[in-house]
Image (cartoon, rainbow, N blue to C red):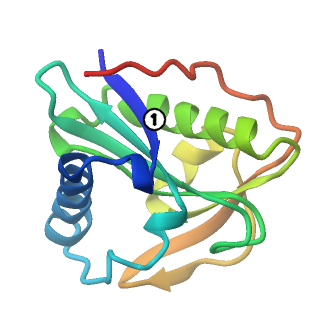
């Protein structure tokens, strides 16, 4: 069972910020061999979702961007689960948390993501629909997807402390 925290940038401790950056670099830069500027300037505006395992290690992360920061709609990005825990439903739990938070913060608004194309079916199961064509984002095929404003709100907004 994971312990979930949702914090604004200013609420993050230095250790939590370091853990988030470390996990993001581990997955996107090292594992996926994607050279990109992770410090994109959006983090200060975001709500950060942190999933900790029983040993206090950050194993899941996502951020919610308010409308108007990257897209007209609110969006969810930097969605990651540590390699050792993939395939165990953590990504779905993380996205349900992020969708529920987004719906509570921005009621009546669609939610946009820039999804890696290989994960399109995963996001479709969560209510997202593809909008637009395939595009390259730092060497990885992506597609924009929207969760309509009238999509059912996922259950689970419980926040625990490690």
Q: Is residue 97 left or right of residue 154?
A: left
Instruction: Determine which quarter of the picture holds residue 97.
Output: top right
Q: Nearer the viewer, residue 153 or 134?
A: 153
The local secondary structure at tag 1 comes to helix
Q: Is residue 159 left or right of residue 123?
A: left
Q: Nearer the viewer, residue 19 or 144?
A: 19
* Residue 116 shows in this picture: no
Q: Is residue 144 left or right of residue 4?
A: right
Q: In the figure, 142 relative to 66: above or below?
A: below
Q: Tell me what residue is drawn at x 73 percent, y 74 percent.
A: 132
Q: Which residue in the protein does label 1 denote?
A: 94
- Residue 130 horizontal/vertical position (percent): 71, 61
- Residue 36 horizontal/vertical position (percent): 30, 83
Mark 1 nearby-residue class (10 Å; few <14, some 14–19, many ≥20): many
Q: Tell me what residue is drawn at x 27 percent, y 47 percent.
A: 13
Quarter of the image where the N terminus is located? top left
Q: Nearer the viewer, residue 110 or 124?
A: 110
Q: In the figure, 17 relative to 3: above or below?
A: below
Q: Tell me what residue is drawn at x 68 percent, y 78 percent.
A: 133
Q: Nearer the viewer, residue 56 or 111?
A: 56
- Residue 33 horizontal/vertical position (percent): 19, 75
């Amino acid at each position: 069972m994971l312990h979930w925290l949702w914090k604004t940038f200013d609420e993050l401790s230095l250790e939590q910020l370091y853990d988030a950056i470390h996990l993001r670099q581990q997955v996107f830069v090292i594992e996926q061999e994607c050279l990109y500027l992770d410090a994109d300037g959006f983090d200060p505006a975001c709500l950060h979702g942190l999933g900790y395992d029983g040993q206090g290690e950050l194993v899941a992360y996502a951020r919610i961007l308010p409308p108007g920061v990257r897209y007209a709609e609110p969006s969810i990005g930097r969605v990651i689960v540590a390699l050792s825990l993939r395939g165990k439903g953590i990504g779905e739990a993380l996205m349900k948390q992020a969708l529920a938070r987004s719906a509570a913060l921005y009621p009546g608004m669609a939610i946009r993501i820039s999804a890696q194309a290989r994960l399109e079916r995963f996001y479709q199961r969560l209510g997202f629909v593809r909008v637009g064509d395939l595009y390259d984002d730092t060497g990885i095929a992506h597609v924009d997807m929207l969760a309509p404003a009238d999509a059912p709100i996922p259950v689970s907004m419980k926040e625990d402390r490690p």
